[in-house]
Image (cartoon, rainbow, N blue to C red):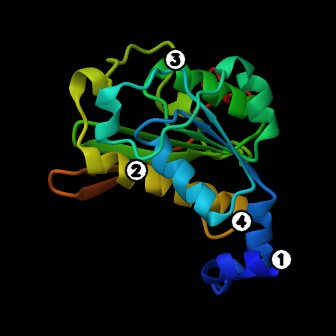
Amino acid sequence: MTDEQLLRYSRHILLDELGVEGQQRLTASHALVIGAGGLGSPVALYLGTAGVGTITLIDHDTVDLTNLQRQIAIQERADAARLDVLVEQADVVIDCSDNFATRHAVNAACVAHAKPLVSGAAIGFDGQVSVYDTRDAANPCYACLFPPDAAFEETRCATMGVFAPLVGIIGTIQAAEALKLLAGVGSSLAGRLQMVDARSMEWTEIRLARQAGCAVCGAR
């Protein structure tokens, strides 16, 4: 690392769990962020300031005035048609999308390429975050919790609204989980779903297990 990098990331390097080697792993890593909106903006911000070497953002949405209430970074949109290739190239994938179709497509690609997936969602005052890392045979994938053929009500910020700071809370946790995975620090949220009610700021944790009958990861 250069003297400038050592100074810039010195507060990270001072952490015994991270050090120079951990920071070098971050600098050499590639993170793929799906969704550059309310969740994706803080994720990209913290990954970038932490020194992640390559960050790819994908978003199909069109930025309009209503997005600015909760988004702190607006990026040029990338084409998601190359999702499978981009997932294969990434070291970690962070799903900040707002619909089940995208989440299931991202999850399937992550399972196929054995990439850890950090998933977050925020609607109204309710948020949730977890890590789906099927490199461990005991860990579930996103489809274990939300089967693709099940009927779930589609909820989006555009119709349901979202408490502005909530996306920052969930997005920051997603960034932290991604950084831990990239640096090889601590234990991830794999097998655990964290949920928060921002009205009371009460957190609930649910333990998750791989489902043998899962159409995506069950046979792996």
Residue 3, x across and y down, in percent: 80, 82
Q: Earlier in the sequence, mark 2 or mark 4?
A: 2
Circle 1: residue type: Thr
Residue 167 seen from this side: yes
- Residue 183's label in the rendered image is 4
Q: Earlier in the sequence, mark 2 or mark 3?
A: 3
101 to the left or right of 53? left
Identify the residue position indicated by label 3 in the image: 101
Question: Which is in the foreground here, disc 1 or disc 3?
Answer: 1
| Residue denoted by label 1 | 2
Q: Secondary structure at mark 2?
A: helix
Amino acid tagged 2? Ile
The location of residue 99, given as percent across then percent down, is 44, 22
Q: Position of residue 165 (x, y in %)?
A: 28, 51
Q: Amino acid at mark 3?
A: Ala
User: Going 60% across and 56% down the picture, which residue do you hit?
Assistant: 47
Q: In the image, is residue 142 above or below residue 182?
A: above
- Circle 1 packing at 10 Å, graded few (<14), some (14-19), many (20+), is few
Q: Quadrant of residue 113?
A: top right
Q: Residue at x 76, y 47 (%)?
A: 91
What secondary structure is found at the residue carrying circle 4?
helix
